[in-house]
Amino acid sequence: MDTSYGNTPLPVWERPEPQPRAAPVTLSRTKIAATAIGVADEHGLDGLSIRKIAKELGVGPMRLYDYVLNRSELLDLMVDAVYARIADGDPHTTWRSTVLTIAHRTREAALAHEWFADLLGARPHLGPHALAVGEATAAALAQAPGLDGIDDLQRALGAVNGFIIGALRREITERRTARSTGTDEAAWQAALGPYLTRMLDTGRYPTVARLVVDGAHLNAEETFHHNLAAVVDGVTGRPRA
């Protein structure tokens, strides 16, 4: 395909949908992405393939290549479909509430589609809905009174996005580990508790001992919100109450 980029194909977002054909099953990129999301939700990214999606749709694998050139384009469509849900919400009146709400919607999306967290922070997400979420986040942070100029905005965006990616990957990794091992927190504590007690009794780890003995088991959602607010307020120079 000759394009303004030479022989490089246009991005999937700019290529028109193939013309409908007389076939028992009608296809669209939206339908393909929705089916792929269902497969990834059940089997993870390792279990995602063009052949498996085609089987779910009841078509031959080659038909899907009319709509996506490769697996990377398929992932782009899936990711942007999730971003569409993150972007779909009521507008907020303050820059801070906008940033916090987008972050919480991103967490909800990642918990519903764990594979989504695997793709956060990897290759750039440039679909229309991903760009809309990025624009809303950047535009909100740009209104923060503590930011002065484009350099401050870039640093703030990097810090907020870095926190979100790290927090979500950790939370989802813990969920996956509990599922794959069949070991919940109580079982883990019972197995390793005696060893940890012996180590803490040496007196070499007093602060760790305080965390283990006196620290409460924190709620994941509340912890995410508290730490997110701390990061947002810190990078924008907003005094915390």
Image (cartoon, rainbow, N blue to C red):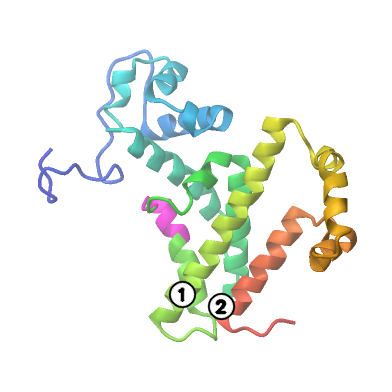
- Classified by dominant secondary structure, the portion drawn in magenta counts as helix
Q: Amino acid at mark 1?
A: Arg
Determine which quarter of the picture holds residue 192: top right
Q: Secondary structure at mark 1?
A: helix
On the rendered image, what quadrant is the C terminus found in? bottom right
Lower sequence index among marks 1 and 2: 1
- Report x, y in % for residue 230: 66, 73
Q: Which residues are magenta?
A: 125-133
| Front-lying residue, 72 or 63 | 72
In reply to whether residue 108 is colored magenta, the answer given is no
In reply to whether residue 129 is colored magenta, the answer given is yes
Badge 1 crowding class, 10 Å Cα cut-off, few under 14, some 14 to 19, many 20 or more, is some
Q: Amino acid at mark 2?
A: Val
| Mark 1 lies on residue | 155
Marks 1,2: beta carbons within 8 A: yes
Vertical comparison of 16 with 154: above or below: above
- Report x, y in % for residue 159: 52, 69
- Distance, label 1 to label 2, CA atoms, is 8 Å
